[in-house]
Image (cartoon, rainbow, N blue to C red):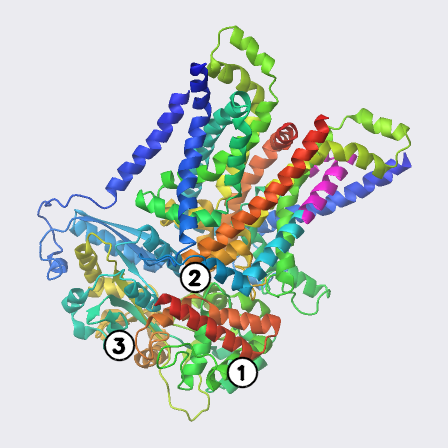
Amino acid sequence: MKKVKTGSVISHTYLILLTFVSVFPLVWILISSVKGKGELTGNPTAFWPRTWTLDYYIHVIKDLNFFVNIKNSVIISLVTTLIAITVASLAAYGIVRFFKKLGSAMSKVLVTTYIFPPILLAIPYSVIMGKMGLINTRVGLIIVYLSFSVPYAVWLLTGFFRTVPVEIEEAARIDGANKMQTFVQVVLPLVAPGVVATAIYTFINTWNEFLYALILMNNTSKMTVAVALRSLDGAEILDWGDMMAASALVVLPSVIFFCLIQNKIAGGMADGAVKS
Amino acid sequence: MAKKNYTRWLFVLPAMVIVIALFIYPICSSVLYSFTNKNLIKATYKFIGFKNYVEVFKDSGFWLSFFHSLKWTVLSLAGQIVVGFTAAMALKRIEVGKGVYKTLLIIPWAFPSIVIAFSWKWILNGVYGFLPNILLKLGICETTPQFLTSGTMAFITLVMINIWFGAPMIMVNVLSALETVPRDQYEAAQIDGARPWQSFYYVTVPHIKMVVGLLVVLRTVWIFNNFDLIYLITGGGPAGSTQTIPLYAYNMGWSTKLIGRSSAVTVLLFIFLMIICGIYFAVINKWEREESK
Amino acid sequence: MKKRYTSLVLAAAVSAAVLAGCGGSKPQTAAPAQTSGQDSTQGVADAGELSGEITFWHSFTQGPRLETLQKAADKFMTENPEVKINIETFSWNDFYTKWTTGLASGNVPDMSTALPAQVAEMINVDALTPINDLIDDIGRDKFAEAAIAEGSMDGNNYSIPLYRHAHVMWIRKDLLEENGLEVPATWDELYETAKTLTKDGVYGLSFPCGTNDFQATFFLDFYVRSGGGSLLTEDLKADLTSDLAIEGINYWVKVYNDCSPKDSINFDVLDQATLYYQGKTAFDFNSGFQISGVAANSPDLLQYVDCYPIPKISAGDETEGIMTTNTPMVVWKASKHPEICKAFMKTLYDEDTYVEFLHATPVGMLPAIKGIADTESYKDDETIQQFTHAEEVLTAAADIGTAFGYEHGPNVQAGIMQNNHVVEEMFQDIITNGTDVETAAKTAEDKLNALFETAE
């Protein structure tokens, strides 16, 4: 009994320490974003703001139009996720169920594409998008984002589809359902948690993507949050208050989202991985 | 039979079309450019054989970057696994507050790289940063520590930031893998008189090595290819001490505009990653075969 | 189900094609005649009605300059209803990535601002359209000859200066007075003064050598040119190993060690200037933009801000011309509507618009055309009245300086030296790895010369 206790005391101490390190940057962003003018640079070690202000937020939202960038990111990430997940679910199911031999070759090809250094793809993509007139458009960025979302999603999803026992499907088939009906009505509901987990991964990856967005988007009003945030750094006035307020606007929704769905992502990937 | 063959392709076709359409051109053009003297802003170029590859191999900067990349990947990955693993074990052990810890511990994972860069650059800023100034104030350091600007510390700091960012993902996955270990196996091991490390080695490890193995593959590729974090935090400096291969390729492509040589670098990077992943997968396949025995 | 995916993919492809088609092929149909901006189109485009869409890239990412340019564009669009001007902005740093990638992918704007040294690179790869007619139209004699020459090759003028500024030494009068110090006139005096002032959370002089900017290249250039030297030889090879350059490198390393925050090794221009804006440095080298920066960040300090000429090696030396920036605008060769670009550019020099634009950063932007500085409307600005001394110093410096690396005339090498961060890497190498100055300088020089060769 005593042993268990020291064990859990050590565990708690360790976890508290880790939690502190994990959370500190978020806390510091939030605190810095509401400190009064001059406090950020004037008194770097003060923790609590002496005066509170929302000026930085107002400036970022009103003058720099940051919500437009958030909207761009949401649209681009959502559409990419939607396309990637539908395409990838079909493919993953197809690979698992109908391609016993070819399937592993297909998976290998997909994994190989994941290995491609984005930096290698950046220039060719900018050339293609330029030729198609898709530079500076959401459509262009979504197409490019599919390049990493689809392979990754297929790879994760094959793991989940493997968990579905073929007998269930056979029962459905006997009842007269065709392949697509079986897939939509029987298989998909079974792997729903895995699909959700994969969708979340895809969404986060696209939301956070930086390099392609930097190269393909020109107009401030078309930029995604990642690039718009960075352009604050190169702007004419370096204002850490603005940067912190904008950071808070970007990171807070993600954090809340993450905390809400944490159990789903937790289970998701391990289940898929274990069984693949 | 013919009908069956036809419909099954419909499932995989959209994905295949997307992947082929999105990769065939970049691959071909990169390989092609790597044999030319293509300049980013010039339209004409000519074939120069393997000269780019020779030049790259001759450049000490390339080898230094390659070495940095290896160091960056190995240290970050090891750190992420150690921290993620121990955190998961600690979480498994406690009974109170598990949910709260878990929620707070995954926060770094939600950070986009640009926000990671902003927040840490701000915290570690040598003039206005909280951490350097508090260390100075408390008398722990005599001069403001240069976390991101000294040749010796910048690299370590970056690795730490990467561990901070990546450990939660390992933690979450290891934790849920741990949950799959049947309790009775631990009990059985305990009855057999196994010490804690023995039950860890004989009961826990076999159950989670698949998950960890796959995570290692994913993370290796991600960390090795990672461009944003380093580019946004140190830009490869100071004095190239944090320059990895992706940054080297970027500078080759955009600063010096030698797209041909930059392509050669990325092709080499890709081949290297293929080999590494091949080895990983061979190991994982072996585990799989052992398991199914 | 599957039909939907196919159609999604199809939709993407179709919209791609449609968008590609829209790229720039807006029909040039005759527009209804009703324009009040006749004089702005005269000479440049005598065809009458202007119609079409142009994209204008500039680097004034926020604040009053962005607003005045937008206002000018709006006005132009009202006067020419068939014209659409799309303004896209990004920082100077990103701008370089953007236009170089843009040339590779066929996505450059119709017109843009630029950095002077990059104009030579643009001309070199045949990316620009000559605008001799626009300059003649506005009045060739209104511009400084040197400013036009910077963007010229083989009798063609490819750039037009929008405004000009010069790099000078900025000081804090209060800090000097409190410590009973004089404004330094030589580099040695500057070092001593800066060292004395490095205390109480203030740094004497920050030396920025981040590799995402070209500040250290500039700082070294100030030193070398003040002694009558150059970082480029007569035949346009890099020269970092001259006695003067080695002396300069040693000087700045000394300043970094004794007067500068250690983080400045990664500083870009903004980090550097922000220190001065916040009152954390006593000296800085920059243009008249410092004034609006201080005004925005620390209004209390504004009264203590002033500027003086860049120091000399010894007090008796002749005054050498150093760095003048004529911020240019260019028209890209790929543009389908150069006539619109030129007509619009011309309106920017209308007195009212132009003065309003200059007033967006008073004293920071000096007029590029003669006569404006004497007008009542130009003088009608508080900051310009308050900083008459600064404006005199800046104007004097601007009159005798050249763009970076153009002391032997316009060349591509200057742009390469400025944008490849070789000098910054050299300084970082010396500071971080303790590399011997002469060895590091030789390595950097060789590297630059190799880069020069690849550009030919």
Q: CA distance from mark 1 to mark 2?
A: 33 Å
Q: Which residue is mark 2?
A: B255
Q: Secondary structure at mark 3?
A: helix
Q: Which residue is mark 1?
A: C191
Asked which quadrant contains residue B151, the reply is bottom right
Q: Tell me the amino acid under the disc marked 2.
A: Ser
Q: Secondary structure at mark 2?
A: loop
Nearest to N terminus: mark 1 or mark 3: 3
Report whether mark 1 lies on the same chain as mark 2: no
Q: Tell me the amino acid under the disc marked 3.
A: Ala
Q: Which residue is mark 3?
A: C146
Q: Which residues are magenta?
A: B78-102
Asked whether disc 1 touches disc 2, contact meaning CB atoms under 8 Å apart, the reply is no
Q: How many marks?
A: 3
Q: Tell me the amino acid under the disc marked 1.
A: Tyr
Report whether mark 2 lies on the same chain as mark 3: no
Q: CA distance from mark 2 to mark 3?
A: 28 Å
Q: Secondary structure at mark 1?
A: helix
Left or right, C418 with respect to B107, comes to left
The image position of residue C299, as x and y in percent, is: 45, 66
Image vertical order of residue C268 relative to residue A232, above or below: below
The image position of residue C343, as x and y in percent, is: 17, 58
Of helix, strand and loop, which mostly describes the magenta segment?
helix
Label 1 crowd bin: few (<14), some (14–19), many (20+), radius 10 Å: many
Left or right, C163 with respect to C135, comes to right
